[in-house]
Amino acid sequence: EAGVAQSPRYKIIEKRQSVAFWCNPISGHATLYWYQQILGQGPKLLIQFQNNGVVDDSQLPKDRFSAERLKGVDSTLKIQPAKLEDSAVYLCASSQRRGGGETQYFGPGTRLLVL
Amino acid sequence: GEDVEQSLFLSVREGDSSVINCTYTDSSSTYLYWYKQEPGAGLQLLTYIFSNMDMKQDQRLTVLLNKKDKHLSLRIADTQTGDSAIYFCAEKTNAGNMLTFGGGTRLMVKP
């Protein structure tokens, strides 16, 4: 079974530029998550989708971050404009469904450096 | 509120046992997880325990849960150099499916 795919793996941009990340979850997984992992810290949830609907985006800085999952499969996370403090690894995860003991499987992440 | 704490660093010799500790504050936690992260890689699920259990063993891994003290530990028996990584504990509560992670414990295994 293929795992969670993410691209690009690395991105370097200047502050105030825009950037987008892409995630393809494990086939059949209804729930998709985006996490931000700042160096030296644990991942922090940004947004959670169930199929193509948003379940929780309370931690998403909506003035600059946006995410969509239009067809309930792939997802994109966008930052516009980027700030220096957005430098982090952005991890995508998926699970078959919400709740219970559903395991989240993580992709390799996109490492973003904002200069 | 939710808060998950871990010690930053642990160093052991190859062949010894490693014990990584984690404390959490949310008493409504339903599942507790251990993830492993190697350099430049995503998180790999190692094991998890349901909150009504106090122990779970899986090959070299033993998870102990003290729900009264809100303390979780991961014991790795016969630690190998390939076990060197950052280990994250995470809790899931009844409020949705979100995970709250600790800051991670860096395990260094010396030959």
Image: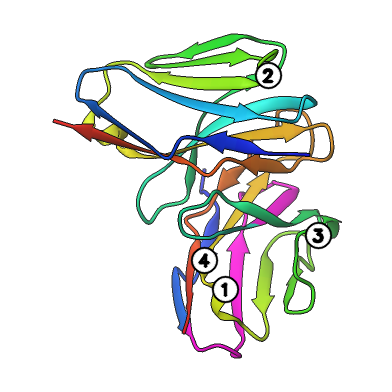
The subunit carrying tag 3 is A
In the image, residue A114 sits, relative to residue A96, either above or below, namely: below
- Nearest to viewer (mark 4 / mark 2): 4
Check disc 2 and report its element: helix, strand or loop. Answer: strand
Residue A63 spot, x, y in % from top left? 78, 78
Q: Are marks 3 and 2 in contact (CB under 8 Å)?
A: no
What's drawn in magenta, residue-wise?
Answer: A13-34
Residue A85 numbered mark, or none: 1
Chain letter of mark 1 equals: A
Q: Which residue is mark 4?
A: A88
Residue A75 among magenta residues: no
Quarter placement of the N terminus of chain B:
top right
Residue A98 x, y percent position in the rendering = 79, 39
Answer yes or no: are tags 4 and 2 on the same subunit.
no
Disc 3 with disc 4 on a shared chain? yes
Q: Is residue B86 left or right of residue B98?
A: left
What residue did someone put label 3 on?
A57
Q: Give the SS element for disc 4.
A: strand
> How far, Cα to Cα, is label 1 from label 4?
8 Å
- For image coordinates 82% across by 58% down, the residue present is A58
Three-letter amino acid code of the residue under disc 4? Ala
CA–CA distance in space, label 1 to label 2: 36 Å
Quarter holding the C terminus of chain B is top left
